[in-house]
Image: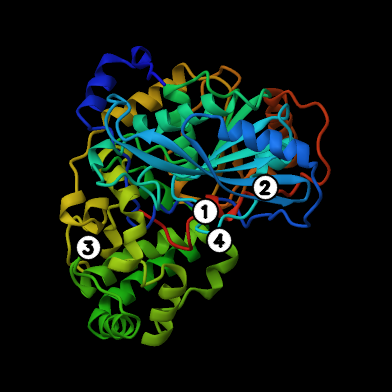
């Protein structure tokens, strides 16, 4: 399939050609999490063998598409697929790789939800449905992001990991499957998956009929612009903010006693640090710096009483930080899966920078809290802010049919996308964290957002029990936050 490069601005195209449009990597896994747990389809049902054969044959007839496996559940057919993609869409006659995706089939004329989670699909994918899929009773196509898990070219040319290349991967998949699915298309994703949906919309605005992006960060400017520091000065109440600041201080003051605990855990579990952060001490400091972010990303005001006081024992402080931020994350083993994200963050996506003024005199490693710190030397990159500035301007000035959902207390929402006035909307779930979704909105907003989504998808009758539908686990990071 020919790549339509004429739609790209000359500046962006030149950057892409130079390989400079690459996404960021999680410093803790882009703290980008998504809403709650998945609803898994179960209860096998009987489907017409004739219909089965027709659909399977049509899928197999698509050039480059391979049907890896098929199961049936609750009236839905579920396929694991691969699709042959060029490593470089600007040079489609070069090497290729197999991109992994799944298909949850309901009906060929039903709406189809394109779900981009921004990371890898589950190793053993379940037939789970995103919130928009449930609200629309639609089909769902879930796509693994290039360079994650099995969707990595061999050899891996990391210059080809950028937002345009991935958007073009998705574009080719949509065009291929539109030969079967004739209904409206909606794209969705949360956190990095939400970002991925925005980038696809920017480069291929006619592929889908609307976008629902959950908790999608918009780190337009690096270095430091202060947005995240302003967020942490006001989130929650003063007593909780003080308690969180103090537990970070105590942990760093007790570094000489707590780092040996981390080293002992590393020896017991086979964790190493030499390929990324270098030492247990640097890993310890990164985890402590990440703790307050992780608290607000995954927990909330109801968990403030559990924050240890300054009089707590070493064990209590270490265990609490471990439960919130996870000392295993900033190890070679914990970070490896997220290398593609951190590479993207360092190169294109940007990352949240913080001053940590309350920790002056206690930290030892200047400039530690940024994505290049957690990458092997060969994957580190200089940052190019132009791609994010371009996307931000396009979303605000030219986009249409885009919906953004954020959580009030989610640090990743400190820098949000601002949608245009072209049938586009921004909603904030009160008190919600990185798991915010449409179901968590105030009733009037929930109804309005649901009606907008249904209108975009051409759906007139709401499905039963769609009110509390969560996004799937695939759309969530583990209980850890990438930078």
In this view, the mark in front (3 or 4): 3
Tell me the quarter of the picture where residue 256 sits. bottom left
In 3D space, how far apart are the residues under numbered discs 3 and 4 (Cα atoms)? Answer: 30 Å
Asked whether 324 or 471 is in front, the reply is 471
Q: Position of residue 18 (x, y in %)?
A: 19, 28
Q: Which residue is mark 3?
A: 276
In 3D space, how far apart are the residues under numbered discs 2 and 1 (Cα atoms)? Answer: 17 Å
Tell me the quarter of the picture where residue 302 sits. bottom right
Q: Residue at x 70, y 33 (%)?
A: 54
Asked whether 139 or 413 is in front, the reply is 139
Are the two marked residues, 3 and 2, in contact with CB atoms closer than 8 angstroms? no
Disc assigned to residue 476 = 1
Badge 3 or badge 4: first in the primary sequence: 3
In this view, the mark in front (2 or 1): 1
Asked whether 343 or 281 is in front, the reply is 343
Badge 1 or badge 3: first in the primary sequence: 3
Q: Secondary structure under badge 4?
A: loop
Report the quarter where the N terminus lies.
top left
């Amino acid at each position: 399939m020919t790549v339509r490069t004429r739609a790209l601005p000359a500046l962006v195209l030149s950057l892409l050609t130079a390989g400079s449009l690459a996404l960021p990597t999680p410093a803790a896994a882009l703290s980008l999490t998504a809403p709650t747990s998945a609803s898994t389809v179960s209860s096998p049902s009987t489907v017409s063998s004739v219909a089965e054969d027709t659909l399977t044959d049509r899928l197999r007839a698509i050039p480059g598409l391979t049907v890896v496996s098929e199961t049936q559940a609750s009236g839905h057919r579920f396929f694991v697929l691969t699709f042959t993609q060029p490593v470089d869409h600007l040079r489609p006659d070069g090497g290729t790789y197999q991109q992994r995706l799944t298909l949850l089939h309901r009906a060929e004329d039903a709406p189809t939800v394109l779900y981009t989670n921004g990371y890898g699909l589950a190793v053993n994918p379940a037939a789970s449905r995103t919130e928009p899929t449930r609200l629309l009773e639609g089909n769902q196509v879930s796509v693994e992001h290039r360079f994650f898990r099995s969707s990595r070219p061999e050899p891996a040319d990391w210059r080809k990991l950028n937002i345009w290349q991935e958007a073009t991967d998705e574009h080719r998949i949509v065009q291929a499957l539109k030969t079967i699915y004739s209904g409206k298309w909606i794209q969705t994703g949360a956190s990095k998956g939400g970002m991925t949906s925005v980038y696809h919309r920017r480069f291929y605005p006619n592929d889908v009929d609307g976008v629902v992006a959950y908790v999608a960060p918009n780190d337009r400017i690096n270095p430091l612009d202060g947005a995240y520091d302003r967020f942490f000065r006001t989130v929650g109440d003063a007593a909780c903010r003080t308690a969180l600041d103090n537990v970070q201080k105590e942990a760093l003051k007790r570094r000489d006693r707590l780092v040996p605990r981390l080293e002992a855990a590393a020896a017991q579990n086979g964790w190493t640090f030499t390929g990324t952060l270098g030492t247990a001490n640097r890993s310890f400091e990164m985890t402590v710096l990440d703790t307050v972010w992780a608290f607000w990303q995954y927990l909330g005001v109801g968990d403030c009483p559990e924050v240890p006081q300054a009089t707590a024992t070493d064990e209590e402080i270490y265990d609490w930080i471990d439960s919130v931020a996870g000392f295993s994350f900033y190890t070679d083993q914990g970070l490896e899966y997220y290398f593609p994200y951190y590479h993207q963050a360092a190169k294109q996506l940007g990352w949240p920078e913080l001053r940590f003024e309350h920790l002056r005199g206690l930290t030892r490693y200047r400039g530690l809290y940024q994505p290049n710190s957690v990458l092997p030397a060969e994957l580190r990159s200089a940052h190019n802010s132009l791609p994010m500035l371009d996307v931000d301007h396009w979303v605000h000035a030219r986009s249409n049919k885009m919906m953004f959902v954020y959580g009030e207390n989610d640090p990743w929402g400190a820098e949000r996308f601002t949608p245009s006035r072209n049938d586009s909307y921004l909603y904030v779930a009160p008190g919600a964290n990185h798991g915010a979704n449409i179901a968590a909105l105030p009733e009037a907003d929930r109804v309005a957002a649901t009606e907008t989504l249904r209108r975009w998808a051409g759906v007139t009758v709401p499905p039963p029990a769609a009110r509390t539908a969560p996004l799937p686990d695939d759309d969530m990071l583990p209980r850890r936050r990438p930078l």
